[in-house]
């Protein structure tokens, strides 16, 4: 059997060693996460975030795995712990944390996180969309309408454009009705205040008239004749 040339043998050995190199915990976790295996991805990702200089994606993957498994508190904790290590992907940490809070019905906290995401990237369309949804849940219809509008500005080709525009029109109608209701309440309050003022003025006038009558009677009493002599009863 003819021996393989030395260069070819070296190349084969290098390829074999490269193929047999052990993957890092992050690489294992990323592969399993992307393979939709969150339970299997957890152990390597939990190791990955403990390594010096860990990739910021490790916390995002880990939080997503927890979220997929319904472990929302753990997902939120992973994102919070990862924030100090976030760099280029900080906007995703805030946005994903907002998503977790929505699932926990903590809509006010969620809106705050989406605001932080917008602060990190003012053109991040998804943050406006998600904050709009959170504000809608908080009954902040005006804020929700503004955010839906901003979302469509940043993502004019959105597949959700038609449904969002219909929602904006509905919000417009609701806001107009709310304005009319507020105007009616204000008008009623002003009418009640005017009636109360008129009543008080009438009461004041009546009391003044009564006081004037009393003064007149007191002045008339000064005209009664007095007797200097002592009155005596007939015996």
Image: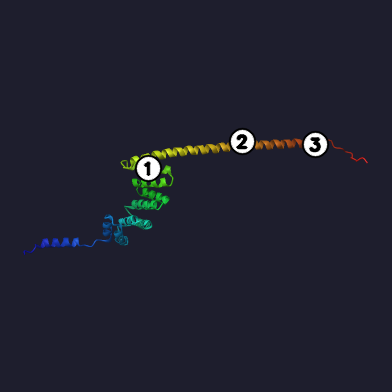
Name the spot of residue 50 as percent of width and height, x first: 32, 62
SS state under label 2: helix
Taking the image as shown, residue 14 lies to the left or right of residue 38, namely: left
Determine whether the residue tagged by mark 3 lies in a helix, strand or loop: helix
The picture places residue 141, in percent across and down from the top left corner, at 42, 43
Q: Is residue 220 visible?
A: yes
Label drawn at residue 98? none
Category of crowding for the residue at label 3, using alpha-carbon neighbours closer than 10 angstroms: few (below 14), some (14–19), many (at least 20):
few
Residue at screen point 16% across, 60% down: 15
Question: Residue 222: which numbered mark, if any?
Answer: 3
Report the residue at 27% width, 57% height from top.
32
Which residue matches tag 1? 148
SS label for mark 1? helix
Q: Does any portion of residue 51 appear in the rendered image?
A: no
Indicate which disc, 2 or 1, sits on the residue closer to the N terminus: 1
Label 2 to label 1: alpha-carbon separation: 48 Å
Image quadrant assignment for residue 152? top left
């Amino acid at each position: 059997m003819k021996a393989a040339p030395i260069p070819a043998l070296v190349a084969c050995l290098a390829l074999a060693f490269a193929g047999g190199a052990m993957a890092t915990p992050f690489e294992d976790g990323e592969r399993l996460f992307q393979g939709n295996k969150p339970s299997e991805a957890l152990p390597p990702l939990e190791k990955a975030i403990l390594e010096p200089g860990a990739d910021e994606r490790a916390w995002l993957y880990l939080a997503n795995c927890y979220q997929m498994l319904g472990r929302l508190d753990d997902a939120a904790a992973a994102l919070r712990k990862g924030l100090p290590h976030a760099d280029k992907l900080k906007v995703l940490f805030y946005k994903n944390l907002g998503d977790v809070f929505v699932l926990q019905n903590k809509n006010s906290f969620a809106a705050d996180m989406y605001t932080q995401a917008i602060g990190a990237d003012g053109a991040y369309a998804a943050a406006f969309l998600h904050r709009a949804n959170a504000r809608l849940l908080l009954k902040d219809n005006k804020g929700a309408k503004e955010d839906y509008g901003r979302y469509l500005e940043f993502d004019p080709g959105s597949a959700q454009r038609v449904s969002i525009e219909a929602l904006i029109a509905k919000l417009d109608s609701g806001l107009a009705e709310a304005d009319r209701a507020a105007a009616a309440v204000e008008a009623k309050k002003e009418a009640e205040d005017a009636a109360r003022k008129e009543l008080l003025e009438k009461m004041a006038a009546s009391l003044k008239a009564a006081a004037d009558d009393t003064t007149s009677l007191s002045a008339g009493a000064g005209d009664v004749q007095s007797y200097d002599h002592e009155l005596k009863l007939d015996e």
